[in-house]
Image (cartoon, helix red, strand yellow):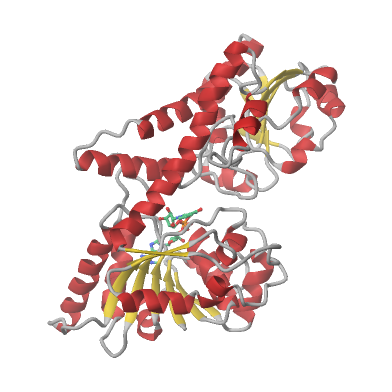
């Protein structure tokens, strides 16, 4: 099929590259000239595992192209995705400026010669599909004067659940596809588009083999409003699971239990499940905070004050404070002291710093007068560029930033941090304080190596 995708960010670029790999003809519409240039050259403008080989391949084969001309891309397309950003406004509501601009470009290019489905892949407040329809219709009318009757275009909601770091895998082998539309033919078009993924009958690309036991992918068909709500409910539940683990951690510390053992113990219950129960510095990233804020905003708009969601956010805010408090407890006076931070990105496998707990913690440490040295295998360039206000000294490797530091704070659970010999950590630290915001190290081994170790909830 001919596919146009507005927004070549984490979601749009990966979706486009995967659909191109599956044999569709994809045009990305991107307003950022630097991103367009990088994509044309086959170079991913973001870090995402496997994209460095997948992208040049589909670009080289001519299956994925990029343009700034939205209306032209729409004229060629059967399926048009909106995958632009929906950042939070100060009120908590999502900013639909970019969705509106994309909708207007779609209205400027769309015509009634064939059936087209416009798909909201961005996470948008409940009811936004209605707005997209209105914006497209208004833009079409502005151009043509009138809008011909009949159902030659439909707006569907197909929320995205990919995780940064495993985005290609999640797109090829998703847990489920949610197709929300109010007309059956739109669902049929999307089923056709995703057919190779649903049936799992494509040849897996070399960078992302099919996992053992992977069967056909379940499809959830729903109305549009429910599809929009599924996305928010999923993120709210996942964030709540982590905040729940952190609340249990607070109690575990007080009674002398180990939250890692406790969560392992409850996670084996099939009604609970083992994932997203890691106590630590809390969740971050571009989605959870923003999506919870937007869902709470919507709830308030309709006269309901959410209680669980509010507690989820509050517990998470406290976890970042707790890390700083632990550094204060270890060093007593922070002013002028050198603190090393391992990990900047909000989770391993990505260079994304949006709402990263590490940034909050570093900002607070600097405000309290500490000197901060930081290391992250992927996200240091982004951090220097996006946060020039943070006077951080970046190090060439994890051990280098420990030289002369009086505390190490672990903020991102990059796997290779686990493999660094504890003795090497001890040897470089001027004082052996380790505040493990991800419960990455083994407390007994750390203490045996002479480290003053504190995890979360242990
Ligand atoms: N990042 C994730 O892990 C993730 C997961 C699921 C859902 N989402 C949702 O998907 C949406 C996109 O997220 P993202 O992380 O890919 O954002 P992003 O900021 O990485 O990418 C958005 C892109 O859209 C471009 N853009 C803005 N306005 C445009 C326009 N009018 N026309 C064409 N391009 C335009 C921007 O330049 C940018 O490259 C958001 O709603 C987000 O909540 C994100």
Residue 267, percent across and down?
61, 36
Q: Is residue 134 found left or right of 362 in the rendered image? A: left
The residue lying at 28 percent from left, 78 percent from top is: 153
At a point 52% along the width and 67% down the height, the residue shown is: 15
Q: Can residue 416 be seen from the camera position used here?
A: yes
In the displayed structure, 254 sits above or below 68; it is: above
- Which residue lies most toward the bottom here? 113
Percent across and percent down for residue 88 are 35, 45
Residue 353 occupies quadrant: top right
Residue 69: which quarter of the image? bottom left
> 117 left or right of 433?
left
Q: Is residue 64 left or right of residue 295?
A: right
Give x and y (percent) for residue 344: 61, 39
Image position of 274 with respect to 65: above or below: above
**With 289 as the anchor, is 359 left or right in this view?**
right
Q: Which of 77/315 is in front? A: 315
The residue sitting at the top extreme is: 332
Residue extending farthest to the left is 146
**Residue 95 to residue 344: above or below:** below
Residue reaching furthest to the front: 270
Q: Observer-nearest residue: 147 or 263?
A: 263
Above or below — where is 299 with respect to 1?
Answer: above
Task: Identify the residue at image location x=67%, y=38%.
Answer: 413
Visible residue check, residue 335 = no
Q: Which of the pair 130/260 is nearer the observer?
A: 260
Q: Quadrant of ligand 1?
A: bottom left
Which quarter of the rendering shows the C terminus? top right
Q: Position of residue 154 (x, y in %)?
A: 28, 74
């Amino acid at each position: 099929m001919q596919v146009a995708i507005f927004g070549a960010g984490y979601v749009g670029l990966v979706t486009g590259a995967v659909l191109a790999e599956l044999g569709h003809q994809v045009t990305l519409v991107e307003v950022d000239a630097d991103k367009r240039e990088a994509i044309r050259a086959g170079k991913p403008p973001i870090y995402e595992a496997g994209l460095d080989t997948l992208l040049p391949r589909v670009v080289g084969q001519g299956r994925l192209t990029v343009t700034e001309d939205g209306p032209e891309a729409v004229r060629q397309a059967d399926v048009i995705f909106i995958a632009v950003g929906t950042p939070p406004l100060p009120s908590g509501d999502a900013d639909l400026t970019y969705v509106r601009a994309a909708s207007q470009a779609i209205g400027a290019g769309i015509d009634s010669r064939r059936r087209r489905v416009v798909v909201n892949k961005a996470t948008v407040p409940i009811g936004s599909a209605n707005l997209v329809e209105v914006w497209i219709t208004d833009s079409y009318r502005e151009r043509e004067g009138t809008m011909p009757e009949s159902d030659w275009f439909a707006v569907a909601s197909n929320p995205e659940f990919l995780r940064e770091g495993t985005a290609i895998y999640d797109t090829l082998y998703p847990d489920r596809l949610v197709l929300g539309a109010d007309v059956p033919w739109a669902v049929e078009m999307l089923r056709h588009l995703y057919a190779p993924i649903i049936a799992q009958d494509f040849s897996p690309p070399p960078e992302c083999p099919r996992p053992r036991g992977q069967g056909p992918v379940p499809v959830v068909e729903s109305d549009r409003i429910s599809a929009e709500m599924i996305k928010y409910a999923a993120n709210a539940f996942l964030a709540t699971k982590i905040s729940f683990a952190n609340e249990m951690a607070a109690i575990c510390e007080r009674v002398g239990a180990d939250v890692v053992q406790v969560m392992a113990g409850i996670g084996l219950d099939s009604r609970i499940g083992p994932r997203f129960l890691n106590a630590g510095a809390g969740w971050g990233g571009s989605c959870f905070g923003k999506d919870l804020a937007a869902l709470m905003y919507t709830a308030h708009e309709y006269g309901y004050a959410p209680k669980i969601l509010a507690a989820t956010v509050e517990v998470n805010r406290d976890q970042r404070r707790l890390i700083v408090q632990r550094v204060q407890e270890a060093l007593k006076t922070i002013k002028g002291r050198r603190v090393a931070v391992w990990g900047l990105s909000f989770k391993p496998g990505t260079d994304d710093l949006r709402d990263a707990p590490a940034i909050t913690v570093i900002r607070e440490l600097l405000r309290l007068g500490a000197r901060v040295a930081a290391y992250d295998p992927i996200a240091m360039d982004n951090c220097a560029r996006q946060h020039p206000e943070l006077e951080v000294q970046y190090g060439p490797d994890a051990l280098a930033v420990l030289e002369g530091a009086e505390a190490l704070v672990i903020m991102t659970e990059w796997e290779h941090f686990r493999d660094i010999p504890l003795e090497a950590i001890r040897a470089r630290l001027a004082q052996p304080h380790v505040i493990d915001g991800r419960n990455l190290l083994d407390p007994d081994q750390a203490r045996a190596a002479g480290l003053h170790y504190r995890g979360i909830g242990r």
